[in-house]
Each structure stands twice: as C-alpha cells, then as structure tokens.
Image (cartoon, rainbow, N blue to C red):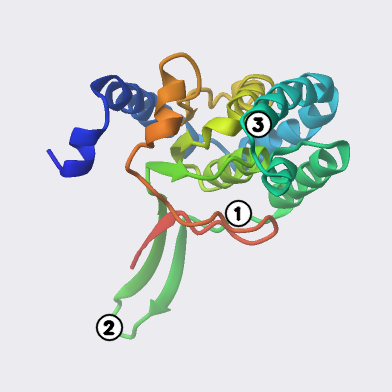
Amino acid sequence: MSRNEKSVPRSVQDAVHACAVRAKQGSATLARASDAEIDSALRAMAERLHTVRGTLTAANRDDLRSAEAGGMSKALQDRLRLTGPRLDDVAAELRTLADVPHEPRDSVLEERRDGLVLLERRRPVGVIGANFEARPNVTLDVTSQFLKSRNGGVLRTGSAALHSAQALITHVITPALTEAGAYRAVGSPMSGVHREVAGHGSGVRVGRATRAGRRPVSTAKIV
C-alpha cells in the first residue's frame, strides 16, 4: 500500500472502489451502444438542462450559501455559480458534441503489395477517473466526453460543488443514460460517506477534457 493510500480512510477507499466497479460493469454497455444511442443521450442531457433548471439552480444556491458562510472568495463563488446563460452554453456544447461524427472503430492505414494490411483500431479505455475543481459545469463536460468515447468513469469534484454535481447526476445525466440504456456507465462518489471522498480524492487523475466540438481523445489506438 502506498503512502497516499495509507492517508485515505478505508471508508473512502471502499466508496471509490465501489463506484469504479459499477462504472466498469456499465462500460460494457457503452462499448456496445450505437452511435445514434450515444448522441441521443447527449441531446437528452442538453434538453434536461432546460426542463429541470429550477432543480439545478436550487441545488446550486445551497452550495453558494455554504461557500459564502465558509468564507469562499467572490471569484471562486462566481466559478461555482450556475446561471441560466451558463446552462444554455453547456446545453449548446452538448448538442455540438452530439453532432461531431464518430471515428470509425477500424481504419485501413495501408494495404501493401505483399498483402499485409495495416489497421488502426480504436477501442474505449474502459474506466477513467476524473478529479476536477468545484465547477459544476465540468461535471457535464467530463461526463459528455466519457459518453462520446464510450468510457465509464468515476467523478470526483470539490466538496463546495457537491449539491450541484449531485443534482446534475440525478436529474440530468442518469435519466439521459437510462434512456440510452447506459445507466451505471458513469459512476459518481457524491453523497453520504462520499462527501468525505471529495475531501480526500481517489488518487486517480486525468487531463482536462477536450472542448466540445473536438473529437474525444480518451480512446486507445492500436496499430
């Protein structure tokens, strides 16, 4: 066991492991999903940002009240805030990502005279851990990239954004994934003992998600 693992309470390790197991189980569903199902889920997420906006902003106000009471700076509070225009921007990005053509799973790179054919094969990584700051919109940024690239994931956000992130998971992401038959493909340690997870982190980090409109990079290429 590493020094970092020893510093994390066992309950936190168990919570993250359970989320990773659920994400692994769901990633097989994502791998089999059609392009149309993936893009349908992204558009459904965009639509729900409008239909459940009141629920999302109410949860965000809870986070903002706690942040203000805890002495968070105005600049950080602004990054935490979910407004109508910001939700509209996220919805537009989700629709843009849904419109991005899917890369073929297999592409012929070269056909040689001796009959040898070189193929480029793209396959999902499986499960990716995402550790990001307390900005609720990033919950959707990361999840949408996981979905487009057919990877399961475990999300870890800052504790200041937990109410907002949980509302997005419960009222936007999960219903959209359920409609697409991909529920549990993206796991999230958010509530109960999982609040402690946000304070410690999972020890797994990934790079910043690509911006909407660009092709996802979280697929493995095997040549």
Q: Nearer the viewer, residue 88 or 31?
A: 88
Spatial CA distance of label 3 from label 1 is: 40 Å
Q: Residue at x 42, y 52 (%)?
A: 206
Secondary element at tag 1: loop
Q: Quadrant of the N terminus?
A: top left
Against 179, is 123 above or below?
below
Q: Which residue is mark 3?
A: 67
Q: Which residue is mark 1?
A: 102
Q: Is residue 118 left or right of residue 171?
A: left
Would you identify the image quadrant in which residue 202 lies?
top left
Q: Is residue 118 left or right of residue 190?
A: left
Q: Which residue is mark 2?
A: 114
Q: Residue at x 36, y 31 (%)?
A: 24
Residue type, numbered disc 2? Asp
Graded by Cα atoms within 10 Å as few (under 14), some (14 to 19) or many (20 or more), the crowding at tag 2 reads few
Residue type, numbered disc 3? Ala
Q: Residue at x 77, y 19 (%)?
A: 55
The x and y percentages for residue 61 are: 75, 25
Select label 1 or label 2 by which is in front: 1
The x and y percentages for residue 101 are: 66, 56
Graded by Cα atoms within 10 Å as few (under 14), some (14 to 19) or many (20 or more), the crowding at tag 1 reads some
From this viewpoint, which residue is outermost toward the bottom?
Answer: 113
Against 9, is 85 above or below?
below
Would you identify the image quadrant in which residue 91 lies?
top right
Q: Counting residues from the N terminus, which is met first, the one under dot 3 or under dot 2?
A: 3
Spatial CA distance of label 1 from label 2 is: 31 Å
Spatial CA distance of label 3 from label 2 is: 66 Å
Q: How many marks?
A: 3
Secondary element at tag 3: helix
